[in-house]
Image (cartoon, rainbow, N blue to C red):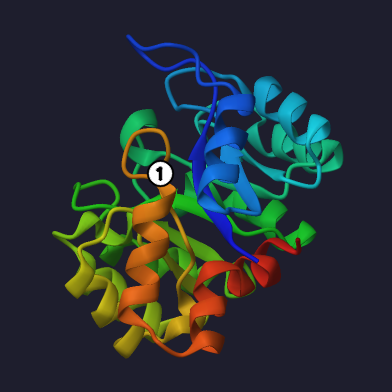
Amino acid sequence: MIIDINNRIGTRPLRSFRSADLLLREMDAAGVDRAVISCFPTQDENAVVLEAIHAHPDRLSGMFLINPHQKQAEASYRRAIEQGFCSLRLEPLAHGFSVDDLALLSPLMQVCAAFETPVWIYGTADVCCAPILFQDLAEAFPSVPVIIGYMGYNYEASSAISIAKRYDNIYLDPTAAMKQNLMRAVNTAGPEKLLLGSGTPVASYFELEIEKIRLIESDPARQQLMLGGNAIRLFRL
């Protein structure tokens, strides 16, 4: 089974609306069985995601995107889980916070721990979300799977890989990673720490990200961990 964990639908700036139906057609063409989806950080459209996952429960799962500065953000996430969302998504660069701000993020992380849901966090080379900043979060909430989205975005890939190796609860979404960085991640952190991410419709596309995994790992069992097995386990799909 092929499961991609980094996809967005809804309204995007200066571009056409990204529909769930279009995403599903692209999934069918690429042989993707299930996608984890969220809305874009510029619009609060979790309702669009909720409608999509309820309409296609066998193909789509939802990440709840919220700005942690929002009042009662943790209560909103609790309701989202009850409605059917399977994970949390945080965008520090878009929403103006740092990954190591435990005072801000702890209420949301406590909900993740209570409901056993993972959290995907945008983690690139930016000062607010560099992989090194994920350490405090990993140590404070060891039971919560924390996914470094975009795996440092190549410039900080080595840091993201080192953090994933060091902490049992840190995982990597290597969306748009260069082949050599993906190989390093598999060889250093292990295939059990990587998930398939394409960042559709902006960063990459399904066929390329799937092919990269197949090129750098020839063992079918290890391939399957990255292509879907790890996602099934973390997101309880």
Q: Is residue 34 left or right of residue 16?
A: right
Image position, residue 209 (x, y; %) = 37, 58
| Residue that appears at 47% across and 27% down | 40
Q: Is residue 165 above or below residue 163?
A: below
Work out whether residue 99 or residue 82 is closer to the camera in this orientation and state it: 82
Where 20 falls versus 31 (above or below)? above
Q: Residue at x 66, y 51 (%)?
A: 34
* Among the 4 quarters of the image, the one containing residue 208: bottom left
Question: Looking at the image, which residue sits at the far left?
Answer: 155
Say which amino acid is labelled 1.
Gly
Where does residue 64 sit, x and y in percent of width and height? Answer: 63, 38
User: For this rendering, which residue is in front, 53 or 218?
Assistant: 218
Residue toward you, 159 or 22: 22
* The quadrant where residue 154 appears: bottom left
Give above or below for 187 relative to 225: below
The answer to whether residue 230 is above or below residue 58 is: below
